[in-house]
Image (spheres, helix red, strand yellow):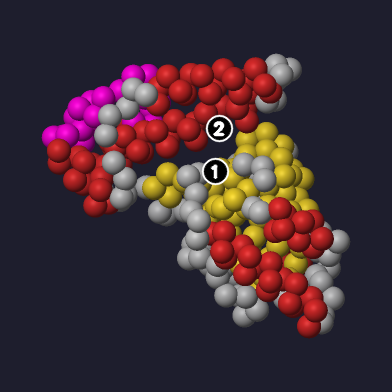
C-alpha cells in the first residue's frame, strides 16, 4: 500500500515555478516510490527513514540530512512517525551536490540555516538576489559535508550469486555467522567471494556484516521507541547485543 505525500505538497511540486520550495512533513507513515524533477534536501527531525536506490539502501536518522538529485528513483519507507524539513530545488537553479542519493552529517550552521528556511513554507520563497544567495550558500556548505562520507548505507550486489550471499547475511544478523557459511550460499569459495565482493560492492564481507548489524540495531531502536520502555534501556540493550556480534565477524 502506498502512503502518498500530502496533497498540498504534491500540488506545489506540480504547479509552482519557485526556485525553492520548503515544506515541513509530519506523517505517521510513508511508503512510496518515485522520482522528482527537483533536487531534494531533507533534514530528519524525528523517526527513521529507510531509503533505497538501485545501488544501495540508506538510513536517515534524526539530525542527519539526505540529498536526492533530480530524476533519482527512490523508494522511501519509515519507522515510527516521522518529522522532517524538506527543501525542493529547481534543477536549473542549483547544481547537484552529489550524484544520486547521499546521507550526510549536518553542522550546526547548516541546521540553523534550514530552521531559518522553514519560515518559507510551501508557497515558495520570495524572489530576490539575497534569497538566492542564502540557498546557494546553504548548498555550498552541504556540498562540503557530503564529501566527508557516511556509514549509513549498504551497497547492493548486481550478480545473482552475490545477491544471495548478501540476502543470507542480512537474514543471519542476530546469529553468529562465518565467511564460509556465506560463501556456500553463493556456491563459491571464501577466497572467490572476497574477490567478487571487492569488485562489485567495494567492501569486504566483514565490513558489510558489521555495517548491516549497525543499521539493524538502529532500526530496532527506532521500532522499540514506540513502546513504553524508556529509550535509554532500548539503546543499551541494542548496543550491547550488537557489540557482541560485531566482534564475531571475519573479514
Q: In the visual, does 211 lie left or right of 58?
A: left
> How far across and how far down the image is residue 120, in percent?
84, 65
> How far across and how far down the image is residue 235, in percent?
61, 23
The residue shown at (59%, 54%) is 66
Q: Residue most toward the front?
A: 108
Give above or below for 232 relative to 56.
above
According to the picture, the residue beneath numbered tag 2 turns out to be: 218
Which callout, 1 or 2, points at the residue further toward the start of the chain? 1
Residue 38 appears in view: no
The quadrant of the rendering that contains the C terminus is: top left
> How far across and how far down the image is residue 51, in percent?
54, 48
Query: Do callouts 1 and 2 mark residues in contact (Cβ within 8 Å)?
Result: yes
Q: Is the residue marked by circle 1 packed among few (<14), some (14-19), or many (20+) residues within 10 Å?
A: many
Q: Which residues are magenta?
A: 169-190
According to the picture, the residue beneath numbered tag 1 turns out to be: 59
Q: In the visual, does 42 lie left or right of 173?
A: right
Residue 23: quadrant of the picture:
bottom right
Task: Give the spatial CA distance, label 1 vs label 2.
Answer: 9 Å
The dot on residue 114 is: none
- Disc 1 element: strand
The residue shown at (24%, 29%) is 179
Residue 233 appears in view: yes
The quadrant of the rendering that contains the N terminus is: top right
Amino acid at each position: 500500500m502506498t502512503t502518498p505525500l500530502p496533497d498540498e505538497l504534491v500540488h506545489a511540486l506540480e504547479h509552482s515555478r519557485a526556485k525553492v520550495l520548503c515544506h515541513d512533513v509530519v506523517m505517521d507513515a510513508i511508503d512510496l516510490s518515485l522520482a522528482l524533477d527537483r533536487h531534494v534536501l531533507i533534514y530528519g527531525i524525528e523517526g527513521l527513514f529507510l531509503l533505497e536506490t538501485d545501488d544501495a539502501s540508506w538510513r536517515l536518522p534524526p539530525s542527519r540530512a539526505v540529498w536526492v538529485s533530480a530524476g533519482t528513483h527512490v523508494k522511501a519507507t519509515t519507522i515510527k512517525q516521522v518529522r522532517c524539513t524538506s527543501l525542493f530545488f529547481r534543477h536549473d537553479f542549483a547544481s547537484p551536490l552529489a550524484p544520486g542519493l547521499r546521507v550526510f552529517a549536518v553542522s550546526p550552521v547548516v541546521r540553523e540555516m534550514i530552521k531559518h528556511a522553514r519560515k518559507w513554507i510551501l508557497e515558495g520563497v520570495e524572489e530576490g538576489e539575497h534569497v538566492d544567495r542564502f540557498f546557494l550558500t546553504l548548498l555550498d556548505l552541504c556540498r562540503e559535508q557530503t564529501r566527508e562520507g557516511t556509514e549509513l548505507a549498504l551497497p547492493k550486489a548486481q550478480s545473482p550469486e552475490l545477491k544471495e550471499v548478501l540476502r543470507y547475511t542480512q537474514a543471519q544478523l542476530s546469529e553468529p555467522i562465518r565467511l564460509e557459511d556465506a560463501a556456500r550460499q553463493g556456491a563459491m569459495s571464501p577466497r572467490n567471494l572476497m574477490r567478487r565482493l571487492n569488485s562489485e560492492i567495494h567492501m569486504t564481507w566483514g565490513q558489510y556484516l558489521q555495517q548491516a548489524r549497525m543499521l539493524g540495531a538502529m532500526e530496532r531502536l527506532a521500532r522499540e521507541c514506540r513502546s513504553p520502555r524508556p529509550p535509554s534501556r532500548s539503546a543499551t540493550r541494542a548496543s550491547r547485543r550488537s557489540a557482541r556480534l560485531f566482534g564475531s565477524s571475519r573479514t
